[in-house]
Image (cartoon, helix red, strand yellow):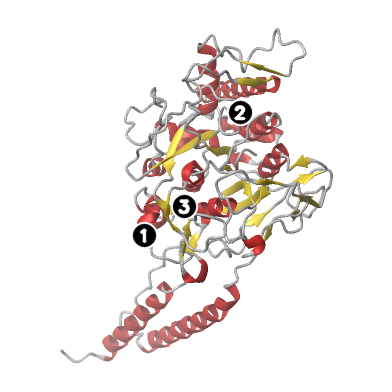
Amino acid sequence: MGRLTQGKRGTAFCSAVAAVCAVVLCWVPSALAVELNEGDWYITKTGVRDAWDQGVTGKGVKVAVLDSQIVSDYPAIAGKGVASKLVLREGASSCKSTDGTRTMRVSNPSLRTGEEGLYMTHGTEMTAYIVGNGSGYDGSRGLVGVAQDAQATHYPMTFGVANLFGLQTACEVNGNVIGFGDTVRAAVADGNRVINMSWHSEDNNEAVEALVEAMRAGVVIVSAAGNNTKDSGPRDYVGEPTKTNRFPGLVAVNMVDASGVTTRRDGGVTLLAPGDDINGYARGDARNASVTSGGSSAASAIASGMLALVMSKWPDATGNQVLQSVVHHTQGNTSGEPVFDKELRSGFGVIDLPKLLAVDPSQYPDINPLLEAAVVNSEKYEETKGMYTDRSGWGDHQIANTQVFDLDGSSHIDVQREASLVGEEYERQKDAWARVERCRADGGADCMQYSATRTGQGASSSSSGGQSSSSKADGARDGVSSPTAVPSSSSSNHLWLWLAVGAGVAALIALIVVACLFARRGRGCATVASMPANVSGMHGVGGGR
C-alpha cells in the first residue's frame, strides 16, 4: 500500500471517523423491540413492513379504540403515548359494576399490570394490534402494531375481564351503562380519523345519531363483524341500523388467514383483513402470547391500523375517499370498480395495503361507498325499500322491521325511526359531490370546500382533511376524563442510555470537525447520510375467537 500524503491521511481519517459516527447514529433504540416471527404475518406478508421501510408509519393520524379497559403498562403499549379517556354522563366521576365490586374512575380509567388478576384485556390486545411495539412480559414476545406512529386514544366501554372473547362486565352510573353515543361524539371531537370497535352491540338505538354525526365529520368507523356462524346476515348488503357491527357506512371486518381464505358466509361483512394464525393471548391472566386466532376483533384492529397508514401516506384525502380506494383496490380486483362478493363471504374483498399506498385516494368522490351501497341496495328490494328513506305510515312507532330478508329466510331487519338520518346523510354527500364537480367544470378554485367532509366538518367544528381538532379533551369536566397516558416503565431506565449515546455522538462529531480542520488541504469530510426515521406504532366486546 502506498504512503498517504498528509491530505489523504486526513481525509481517510475523517471518513473513518464519519463511518464510525454513522454506525453510532444508526444504533438507536427502535420502537419495534423484537424480531418478527410467523405470528406476525399480518406485518411481513401484507406490505406493512414495506410501508415502514418507506417511512409510512401512521404518524399524524389519530385512532380511537372503543373497547374494554386497557392494562396501560402492558409493555407493548407502555411508552406509546396511549391515552385512556372515560366518558360519563351527568358529570359523574366514576362508574361501577352491577354488583358494586369494581369501580372505574374518570381520573384514571385504565388498569395496571396484575390489577384484578389481569395482565391482558380485550381492549389492550386491540390497541396493541394498532400501535404495539412487540414487547411482552418478562422479556417475552408481545404484540406488534400495524401503525407504529399513530396516536391511539382508548375509550373504555366496559371493565376488563379474564375471558377476552365473551361478554364483558358493564360499568354503570345510576343504572345506565357507559353511553355509546357520548363516547363516539367524544372520539370525533378529539380529532380521531379512525374509530375502531372490535365488538358489537344490538338494539342500540342511540347509535344512529352518533354514528351518522361521525360519518358527517369524515371519520372512518371500523367494526368487528362478529364470529357468530349462526347469523349469516342479510341476503345483500343493506346494513342493519340497530347493530353496531352492521351499521350502514361503517367497515364491518371479518378475518382471513395468510392464504386469504374465509369460510364464513355473512351478508353484513364489507371487508376482510388478517386475523387468523397471529400472535395473541388466550386469557386475561396470561403473560405469554402464542399463535392463535384473533377472530374478527383482531381483523378489525389490524384493518384500522392499515387505514391509519393509508391516511398518513395521503393526508389530504378525506375518509370517504380512503374508503373509496379501499373498495376499488381489494386483493385480486383488477376491474377498477368495486366488486361485492355475491356469495356473501368476503364483502368487497381482502384489504390490499400496497395498492392503497400506491394510489392517491383524492381522485375518488367524497362519498362513503359503504353508505351509498347500503342505501341504494335497500331501495332495490321490496322487502327493504324505504328503510332509510320513508317514514310515511309509521304513525307514532319508533321502531319497525322489514320483511324477511336474510339468507335463511327466517329473519327481518329492525329499523329505528332515526335511521332516516342514514338516507339523509347519503343524499347530503351525493349533493355535495355534485356541487364539487360543477365547480370543477366551471374552472373554480378549491372546489373541495363544497365537499361533504368539508361542509360536514364545519357543522361539527372540525378541521379540513378529516383531521378534527381536539376540542373537548382539556380537563376533567362534565364527567369526561382528559386523556391520561402512563409513561413507559422503562423510559427512565433508558434515559442514561440516551445521554451516553448523545454525549458519545457529540464527541465523535467534534472529533470529525477537528480532523477536517487538519485535513483542509484534502477533499474534506464525507457527509454522513441522514438516517431514516425510526419506526416508533355490549354484546360481547370483541367478535370472539
- SS at circle 1: loop
Q: Residue 405 vs residue 168: left or right? A: left
Q: Earlier in the sequence, mark 1 or mark 3?
A: 1
Label 3 packing within 10 angstroms: few (<14), some (14-19), many (20+): many
- As shown in the figure, which amino acid type bears the numbered disc 3? Val
Residue 267 horizontal/vertical position (percent)? 47, 26
- How many angstroms separate mark 3 from mark 2 (CA)? 33 Å
- SS at circle 2: helix
Residue under label 2: 450
Q: Earlier in the sequence, mark 2 or mark 1?
A: 1
Indicate whether 344 appears above or below 489: above
Label 2 packing within 10 angstroms: few (<14), some (14-19), many (20+): some
Identified at 57% across, 44% down, the residue is 166
Identified at 32% across, 42% down, the residue is 259
Indicate whether 49 appears above or below 260: below
Closest to the camera, between mark 3 and mark 2, is: 3
Q: Is residue 210 visible?
A: yes
Q: Marks 2 and 1: CB-CB under 8 Å?
A: no
Closest to the camera, between mark 2 and mark 1, is: 1
- As shown in the figure, which amino acid type bears the numbered disc 2? Tyr
Residue under label 1: 37
> The N terminus is located in which quarter?
bottom left
- As shown in the figure, which amino acid type bears the numbered disc 1? Asn
Residue under label 3: 146
Q: Residue 302 vs residue 430: left or right? A: left
Q: Is residue 59 visible?
A: no
Residue 353 horizontal/vertical position (percent)? 40, 43
Identified at 39% across, 55% down, the residue is 39
